[in-house]
Amino acid sequence: MKYSKTLALICSIFLFNVSCTLNNKEKPDETVRKLLPDAPLEVTVAPLKTIDFEHELVSNGKIAARTVAELKFKTSEVISQIFVRNGSQVKRGELIATLDTYSLSTRVKQAKDALDRATLEYQDVLIGQGYKLDELENVPADIINLAKIKSGLNTAQTQYEIANHDLYQASLVAPIDGTIANLFAKTNTLSYPSEVFCNIIDTRSLEVQFTVLENELGYIKTGDEVKITPFSIPDLTVGGKVTEINPWVNENGMVKVRASVTYNSRLVEGMNVRVSAFRSAGKQWVVPKSAVVLRTGKQVVFVMSDGKANWNYVQTGLENATEYTITSETLKEGDMIITSGNINLAHESPVKVLNEEATEK
């Protein structure tokens, strides 16, 4: 009896499990069922057109002023006054600094006395030769020269002119309009003729110096437009034009280029900048860089047709910051190029266009 009851219990449990399994097969999991259909991926599209393409050549460079004046004192004297500071705006002829002129003025007086004595000696020499001072125009040139040498008049005249020049140079005057830079001297200290007292930078004549690769020379010429963006001020962009291309390739395969820069008060000498040179490359097929993706190591552009994405292998040519030119013939004018949402696309993936107005153009 015990054996029969046990066998009956086992059979009941077995039948219950079979029933549960059959019921589960008849009702598949709802979550799995919902994941099976492929939902169309959302994309944006744009028609492939032939447009004028601006090739962009990018390089790094430095801002420099075309006109920079170096100011130096000619003598070593105590600096009496400084009227400017770094960053001061000055006009041509404006006083920058002065030296103490006591010793310089004394040298002028001494030189003037020596000149007067030499003049008297010169006159005595001529009188001794039998000439009258009011008839010097009749004295032969060789006699005049001999009298000047014997009296020391030439030397005295030179020393007097030097002393006057040194006194005049005791005042530094701005030779150009511009901004004061590299001024580190202080009053009541000695000036040094071998050192630059300060620089004056003409900030209204700025230029940028940059380099391009030898194989990029064909994409740049004088007169091309450039845009300059300082690395320290990324929100600032100023324009300019290529003014000079040095016809020399250095040992690194680089060529130096200069371009004028539109004046902006935020630009300073020596500033590091990003330079973009632009030149029209004529009519080209152009697509956004976002439209080109890699598949199996090759460049692919997806074209939307009948609600599906079809991939096409392409070859790109020139480029700028945002676009490529297409040089292959796998596409045709008017193809609806998928410009975004293409990262996870496969061939013939269903897609849904977000910018419907693009398909109507």
Image (spheres, rainbow, N blue to C red):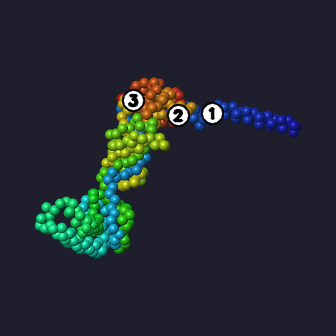
> Residue under circle 2?
294
- Residue count near mark 1 (Cα–Cα under 10 Å), binned few <14, some 14–19, many ≥20: few
Q: Position of residue 321 (x, y in %)?
A: 42, 40
Residue sitting at x 15%, y 67%: 131
Q: CA distance from mark 2 to mark 1?
A: 38 Å
Q: Nearer the viewer, mark 3 or mark 2?
A: 3
Screen quadrant of the C terminus: top left
Residue positioned 24% across, 69% down in the render: 151
- Left or right of 95 in this view: 9: right
Residue type at mark 3: give it. Gln
Residue 284, disc: 3
Q: Residues within 10 Å of mark 3 (few under 14, many from 20)?
A: some
**From the image, which quarter does the N terminus lie in?**
top right
Residue 28 is labelled as 1
The numbered mark, 1 or 3, whose residue comes first in the sequence reads: 1
User: What is the quadrant of residue 225 in the picture?
Assistant: top left
Kind of residue at disc 1? Pro
